[in-house]
Image (cartoon, rainbow, N blue to C red):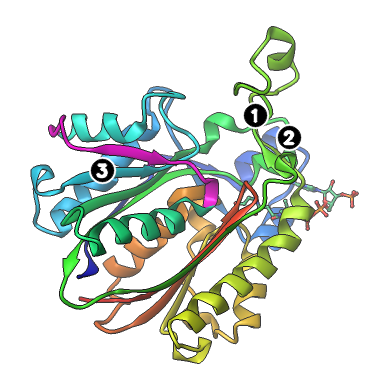
């Protein structure tokens, strides 16, 4: 049994935060942000908009794209680090609000690698015959975890969602995967408090312990190496080489990271899907958002070979080699 993508969708909140807006609240500049990250804008959820709301909007577009109803999907999976609540899983809320309470639903929490891990898990569920059709959504409201007084992180993150409906198929789109993690130094990129290690107190809240902390330069160095190695491993497991690829669809964390990885994989710019200028870093949502836009823009053709690759907190990383089936 194989798996294919039957429909794609995406959603981003209406409110936009530009580099010019950030210049007004931080010691930064459009020039610094553009040259160091490639970002120009990011979309920001409204105060009453939660991750499940973004996920549902993306899921509805994917259902319409596939001419399916919520009941036609057997299982709902949400990859996110910004769930509506610590528990229950956001997937449960999404399925119920789509009118299909009772269906299995769960979350995957592996930060920016969420869609890569999710694609591997969901493809395995379908290829092994457990489910015929699964909705995989990457959705984030990272703006709610950003300290807008910290210029090293405030400029990077945005909100959005991307959804893919995966279904069984006689031809297999899933060619190979490579996944990895290293939890030796979680503080390289983490949310310090609010978990069982460090529960929230008024003092910790005052010190922004409930917001993203990151050693940016450390993450940068690891990101390029891991995305390249992981992509090459997934490709070799599929008996493919970088020159066979139609597209590289990387996690959108920093334009310089994407360009360096693409260069080391000898991928020319026209084969690399980039939308970082519009959305910033949307963690688990970035790859499905970029994929859905590429599909909407009719860039993908039947038989195209794609590598999806990402990295993030964990640290974690991965790549999936995929054959696009129209
Ligand atoms: O999904 C995974 C999540 N995270 C990432 O992918 C992040 C990976 N890392 C990066 O993207 C980059 O490291 C950053 C964009 C975060 C930072 O870029 P960088 O080129 O590594 O800059 P840096 O941290 O080495 O800082 C260079 C200078 C510093 O000033 P000094 O010490 O040289 O005087 C910073 O204080 O730039 C300063 N700086 C800023 N200046 C203006 C840091 N942030 C800003 C800012 N505006 N927003």
Kindly identify which numbered label has been placed on residue 76.
3
* Residue at 50% in and 38% down: 81
Would residue 282 be seen by someone viewing this image from the given angle?
A: no
* Residue at 42% in and 29% down: 46
* Residue at 27% in and 66% down: 296
Return the disc, 2 or 1, that comes first in the chain's sequence: 2
| 266 drawn magenta | no
Observer-side mark, 3 or 1, equals 3
Please name the residue that numbered disc 1 is placed on: 211
Judge the density around disc 3: few (<14), some (14-19), many (≥20) Cα neighbours within 10 Å: many
Please name the residue that numbered disc 2 is placed on: 150
Q: Does dot 1 land on a helix, a strand or a loop?
A: loop
Observer-side mark, 2 or 3, equals 3
Which region is colored magenta?
99-112
Q: Is residue 1 left or right of residue 42?
A: left
Q: Is residue 294 left or right of residue 117?
A: left
Return the disc, 3 or 1, that comes first in the chain's sequence: 3
- Where is residue 89? Give x, y as percent: 36, 30
Would residue 39 be seen by someone viewing this image from the given angle?
A: yes
Choose top left, top right, bottom left or bottom right for residue 127.
bottom left
- Where is residue 118? Give x, y as percent: 39, 53
């Amino acid at each position: 049994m194989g798996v294919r993508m039957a429909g794609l969708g995406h959603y981003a909140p209406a409110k936009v935060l530009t580099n010019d807006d950030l210049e007004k609240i931080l010691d930064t500049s459009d020039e610094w942000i553009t040259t160091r990250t490639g970002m120009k804008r990011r979309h920001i959820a409204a105060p009453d908009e939660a991750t499940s709301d973004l996920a549902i909007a993306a899921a509805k577009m994917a259902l319409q794209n596939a001419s399916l109803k919520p009941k036609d999907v057997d299982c709902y999976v949400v990859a996110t680090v910004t769930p509506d609540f610590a528990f229950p899983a956001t997937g449960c809320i999404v399925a119920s609000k789509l009118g299909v309470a009772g269906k299995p639903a769960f979350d995957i929490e592996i930060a920016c690698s969420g869609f890569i891990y999710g694609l591997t898990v969901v493809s395995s569920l379908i290829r092994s015959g457990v489910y015929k059709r699964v909705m995989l959504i990457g959705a984030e409201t990272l703006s709610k975890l950003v300290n807008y007084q910290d210029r090293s992180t405030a400029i990077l993150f945005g909100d959005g969602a991307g959804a893919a409906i995966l279904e069984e198929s006689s031809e297999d789109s899933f060619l190979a995967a490579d996944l990895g993690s290293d939890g030796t130094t979680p503080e390289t990129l983490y949310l310090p408090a609010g978990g069982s290690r460090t529960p929230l107190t008024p003092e910790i809240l005052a010190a922004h312990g409930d917001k993203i902390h990151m050693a940016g330069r450390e993450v940068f160095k690891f990101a390029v190496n891991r995305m390249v190695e992981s992509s090459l491993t997934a490709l070799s497991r599929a008996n493919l080489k970088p020159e066979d690829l139609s597209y590289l669809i990387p996690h959108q964390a920093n334009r310089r990271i994407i360009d360096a990885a693409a260069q080391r994989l000898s991928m020319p710019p026209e084969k690399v899907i980039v939308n970082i200028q519009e959305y910033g870093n949307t963690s688990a949502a970035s790859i499905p958002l970029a994929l859905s836009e590429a599909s909407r823009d009719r860039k993908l053709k039947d038989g195209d070979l794609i590598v999806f690759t990402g990295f993030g907190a964990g640290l974690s990383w991965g790549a999936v080699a995929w054959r696009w089936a129209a």
